[in-house]
């Protein structure tokens, strides 16, 4: 007889929760409205979850937000990575990690 494996135990993958996705998608929507981004991809793996934002679908992602829970106690579980692969910001507060992208939307008013 085949043993029954609970669904949660069989698939151990890192995911973005509802509050994290809400913050990410709000920023994504504002970037799309500004004409800076056109597409996104979400990769959920066993080690990390990644949200990638693209200027065009055929290019490499302009920015990647990586969630790696193993780094929660050290450098921070969220990392903002540029197109070149450089880590721009790292921390445990998602809002602070996304702040450099939100600053791109600010415009000076005379």
Image (spheres, helix red, strand yellow):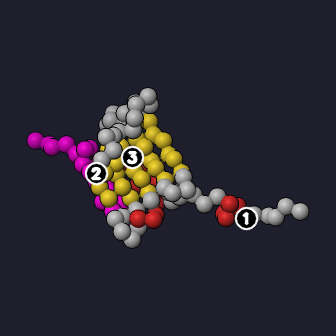
Helix, strand or loop at label 3? It is strand
Q: Earlier in the sequence, mark 3 or mark 1?
A: 1
Helix, strand or loop at label 2? It is strand
Residue drawn at point x = 49 percent, y = 53 percent: 49
Helix, strand or loop at label 1? It is loop
Q: Is 107 left, or right, of 61 in this rendering?
A: left
Extreme residue toward the top, this view:
58
Residue 45 image point, x, y percent: 54, 52
Count of numbered marks: 3
Considering only vertical position in the picture, is 7 above or below 110?
A: below
Q: Is 9 left, or right, of 56 in this rendering?
A: right
> Which stretch did the figure color magenta?
91-110
Badge 3: few (under 14), some or many (20 or more) residues near its Cα, within 10 Å? many
Examine the structure image and report whether residue 81 is included in the region drawn in magenta.
no
Query: Residue beneath label 1, please?
Result: 6
Residue 107 image point, x, y percent: 19, 43
Extreme residue toward the right, this view:
1
In three-dimensional space, the C-alpha distance between marks 3 and 2, rounded to whole angstroms, equals 10 Å
Badge 2: few (under 14), some or many (20 or more) residues near its Cα, within 10 Å? few
Considering only vertical position in the picture, is 104 above or below 38?
A: below
**Quadrant in which residue 94 is drawn:** bottom left
Residue drawn at point x = 36 percent, y = 68 percent: 74
* Residue 40 visible, this orientation: yes
Query: Residue beneath label 3, please?
Result: 64
Query: Residue beneath label 2, please?
Result: 88
Q: Earlier in the sequence, mark 3 or mark 2?
A: 3
């Amino acid at each position: 007889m085949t043993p029954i494996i609970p669904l949660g135990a069989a698939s151990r993958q890192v995911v973005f929760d509802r509050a994290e996705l809400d913050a990410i998608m709000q920023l994504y929507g504002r970037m799309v409205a500004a004409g800076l981004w056109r597409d996104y991809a979400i990769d959920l793996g066993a080690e990390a979850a990644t949200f990638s934002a693209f200027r065009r679908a055929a290019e490499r992602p302009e920015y990647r937000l990586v969630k790696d829970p193993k780094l929660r106690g050290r450098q921070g579980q969220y990392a903002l990575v540029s197109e070149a692969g450089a880590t721009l910001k790292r921390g445990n507060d998602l809002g602070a990690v996304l702040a450099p992208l939100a600053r791109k939307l600010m415009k000076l008013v005379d």
